Amino acid sequence: MSTLIAEARASTAEPAHLIARFREHMLEHGLEVDGPVEDSRIAFPGGVARLRLEPGAIAMRIEAIDADRLEDAQVVVAGHLDSFVPGENLGIVWAGDGAATADARPHNFRVTRVKQVADVTPRMRRVTLGGDDLGRFDAEMMHVKLLIPTPGQGDAEPVWPRLSPSGQPVFDDCSLTRRTYTIRRIDLAAGEMEIDFVLHGDASPGSRFAAHAKPGDWLGVSGPGGGQVPLRGWTLIAGDETALPVIARALEAMPADARGLAFIEVADRLEEQPLHHPPGLPVRWLHRDGRPYGAALLEAVRNAPWPEEPELSAWAACEAQTAVALRTHWGQERGLPRGHFRAAAYWRQGVEEGAGKGSAE
C-alpha cells in the first residue's frame, strides 16, 4: 500500500509555544504524541503528523494510508493551529498529495436531502436524511456538523463550502448555519441517516429546521468527529436531552457484560424513550418538571453510589455550567484520575453554538 504525503509550513511568532499547545490538545483528545516539542509526532487514525520546529515557523509533514485519512489530519492540524493564534496569518498552504484543487469541496462533506420526519417524543423530532457515499459516517465517532440553509431560499440547492489552500472549508455564501449534532442511526444500504433534534422554538437554527423540515429539503453534513462514550471499568454516564442520541447509540453498541449506571435528564416523563442497554448498566430517567437545567442531573450524580471496583470512570455531556460542576465533582471530590472522566459542554444556556467558550462541541 502506497503512502500519501502532504507538507506545509506555518509562520508564527512563537512556534515552540504553538507546538506545545497543539500537543497538549491532542493528548486531551486521546491521540498518541511522541518526541520532543522540537520534533513532535502525533499518531492519527491511519496516519501520522510530524511537526518540526524552525526559526519563526513550524514545518509540517503528514503521511496517511489514503486520501480521506490524509485530509482528516490536515484539517485537524491546520485548523487547530489557526484557532490557537487567531490574530496571526500562519500562511499554511499544503503541497504534495494533500494540495487543494480549485473549487474542490471538503472531502468530509456530503449533500443530503430530507426523506422523512417523525416525532420520537413531544420535544424530540427525528429527521431521516438521504444521500450518496455516506460510508465515512458509519464510524465510532458519532458527531457531525450540519450545514443548515437559511429559511426562505426555496428549492434551489445552496452554495456549499469549498477548500482553502490550508485545507479548511471556505463559506462564500453566508446562508448556511453550522451546528453540531449526533447521528442516531445510519443505514448504508438504504443511503440514509437519522438525526434527532430537540425542539425548543424557532430561535435555534437546528430546532427551526427540524420543526419545519419536509421531504426534499437540503442539508449539508460534514464529519464525523468526537462523540464516543468510552468504557473503562465500571462507568457512570450522565447527560441531558442534547446528549440522549449519543448515549442511546453508545448503549446499543456496548458489550452485554458492560457495567455501570446512566442518568438522563429530560423535561418530564413524556420525554422518556425506550433504550436498549446492557443489563449491568441500567438507565435512570430524571425529570426537570420545571427545575433549572442540570439541577436534577448534578444532584443524582453527586448522590450516586460508587461500587468498590478496581477501575472506575465517568462520562457526561450537558449544559456548560453543569459540565464544569461534574468535572470538579469527579476530579476533586471523587478523586478519579485524569483521563478517567470527561464532562463535555454540549451547549451553554443563553449562548448560541460557537458564540462562546464551551458552548458546544
Image (cartoon, helix red, strand yellow):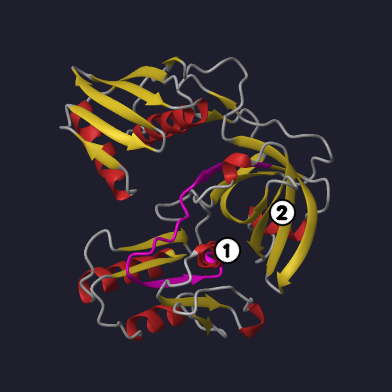
What x and y, as percent, mark residue 215?
A: 83, 50
* Amino acid residing under circle 1: Pro
Q: Quadrant of residue 200?
A: bottom right
Q: Which mark is residue 245?
A: 1
**279 horizontally vs 45: left or right:** right
**What element does badge 1 sit on?**
helix
User: Would you name the residue on which mark 2 appears?
Assistant: 209
**33 horizontally vs 347: left or right:** left
* Amino acid residing under circle 2: Phe
Task: Select label 2 or label 1 by which is in front.
Answer: 1
Which one is nearer the viewer's eye here, 46 or 246? 46
Look at the image and tell me in which quarter the N terminus lies: top left
What x and y, as percent, mark residue 26?
A: 31, 42
Q: Which residues fall within the magenta stretch?
A: 220-245
Which class describes the residues within 10 Å of circle 2: few (<14), some (14-19), or many (20+)? many
Verify whether residue 233 appears in magenta: yes
**What element does badge 2 sit on?**
helix
Q: Is residue 89 visible?
A: no
Q: Residue at the location (44% across, 19% down)? A: 2
Verify whether residue 95 appears in magenta: no
Residue 319's place in the image compared with 182, above or below, is: below
What x and y, as percent, mark residue 265?
A: 51, 77
Q: Is residue 23 visible?
A: yes
What x and y, as percent, mark residue 76?
A: 41, 35
**329 horizontally vs 322: left or right:** left
